[in-house]
Image (cartoon, rainbow, N blue to C red):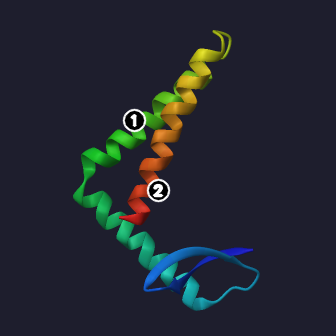
């Protein structure tokens, strides 16, 4: 399965299909360029979401024996980081 973009009511949504097309690849490249343009305009935002992801991964690596609460915090940091990356693709 290949994820590609399909127009739907003037907006683009991610759809999954068993076929691949060159047009979907071009749409993915355009989306990537849009995300990179957002990253260039907002370096503090990009740095923050990557730092939060790094903190979450660091907590997972450094303190898995400390109990469940550090793991919950780690997943919270990672979730915020992933949502931040998702916002970059949507914005």
Which percent across, then down, holds residue 31?
44, 73
Which residue is denoted by mark 2 in the rendering?
86
The residue that appears at 44% across and 70% down in the rendered structure is 32
Q: Residue furthest front?
A: 9
User: Which sits in the foreground, 12 or 33?
Assistant: 12
Please tell me which of labels 1 and 2 falls first in the chain.
Answer: 1
Is label 1 in a helix, a strand or a loop? helix
Q: Quadrant of the C terminus?
A: bottom left
Total labels drawn: 2
Which percent across, then down, holds residue 7?
51, 86
Note whether 45 is above or below 55 in the view shown. Answer: below
Whole-Å distance between the Cαs marked 1 and 2? 16 Å
Which residue is denoted by mark 1 in the rendering?
51
Q: Quadrant of residue 72?
A: top right
Note whether 87 is above or below 7 in the view shown. Answer: above
Q: Quadrant of the N terminus?
A: bottom right
66 on left or right of 90: right
The residue that appears at 52% across and 84% down in the rendered structure is 8
The residue that appears at 47% across and 48% down in the rendered structure is 83
Label 1: few (<14), some or many (≥20) within 10 Å?
Answer: some
Which percent across, then down, holds residue 81?
46, 42
User: Which sits in the foreground, 12 or 85?
Assistant: 12
The residue that appears at 68% across and 11% down in the rendered structure is 65
Q: Quadrant of residue 50?
A: top left
Is label 2 in a helix, a strand or a loop? helix
Q: Would you say residue 63 is visible in this rendering?
A: no
Closer to the observer: label 1 or label 2?
2
Q: Residue furthest left?
A: 41
Label 2: few (<14), some or many (≥20) within 10 Å?
Answer: few
């Amino acid at each position: 399965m290949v994820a590609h973009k399909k127009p739907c009511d003037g907006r683009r949504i991610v759809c999954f299909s068993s076929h691949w097309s060159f047009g979907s690849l071009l749409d993915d490249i355009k989306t990537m360029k849009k995300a990179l343009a957002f990253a260039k305009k907002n370096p503090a935002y990009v740095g923050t979401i990557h730092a939060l992801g790094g903190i979450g991964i660091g907590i997972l690596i450094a303190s898995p024996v400390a109990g469940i609460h550090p793991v919950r915090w780690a997943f919270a940091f990672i979730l915020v980081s992933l949502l931040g990356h998702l916002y970059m693709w949507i914005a």
